Image (cartoon, rainbow, N blue to C red):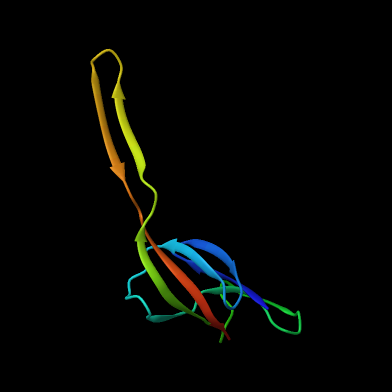
Amino acid sequence: MFAVIRISGKQYKVSVGDTIEVDHLDGDVGQEIPLESVLLYVGKDNKAKVGKPTVKNTKAVVKIIEQKKGKKIDVLRFKAKSRYRKLRGFRPMLTKIEIVSIS
C-alpha cells in the first residue's frame, strides 16, 4: 500500500511509516497534519486510484518529527575586471515528517 502525495509543489511516493524530509511546513514538533493532496493511491488490493487532479475522499496524515536547517548553499556574485565579488550563504528550512496513515 502506497500513495503519491504533493507537498509544497513536489511529489513524494510514500507508505505508512516512512519518514521523509520536505520543504518547511508550519507546525510544532509532534503535531499531526492532514494532507488532502493525494495524487495516486494503491490500496491493499493492488488497485490504483488516480486523481484528477487529486483522489477524492482520500487523505494522508503526517506527523512532524523535526524542524531543522538544511545544508548551506553558497551564492557568489562576480563581475569581471572590476574586482567585484560578493558571497552570501543560504540555509533552507526543512521539516522531517513521518507518514502516520493513508486512508
Q: Residue at x 68, y 78 (%)?
A: 1
Residue 18 drawn at (x, y percent): 56, 72
- Front-lying residue, 96 or 7: 96
Q: Is residue 60 left or right of residue 3?
A: left
Q: Tell me if 41 is positioned left or right of 34 in this view.
A: right
Tell me if residue 76 comes above or below residue 1 in the rendering. above
Task: List x then y, in percent, for residue 22.
Answer: 45, 63
- What's the residue at 76%, 84% (across, down)? 45
In the image, is residue 66 above or below residue 82? below
- Judge whether 85 appears above or below 30 on screen: above
Can residue 41 be seen?
no
- Front residue of 56 and 31: 31
Residue pushed farthest top? 81
Q: Which of the 4 image quadrants contains residue 33?
A: bottom left
In which quadrant of the rendered image does the C terminus lie? Answer: bottom right
- Using the rendered view, name the quadrant where residue 29 is placed: bottom left
**81 to the left or right of 6:** left
Residue 60 appears in view: yes
Give the residue drawn at x 38%, y 53%: 70
Number of marks present in the image shown? 0
**Percent of width and height locating residue 84:** 23, 21
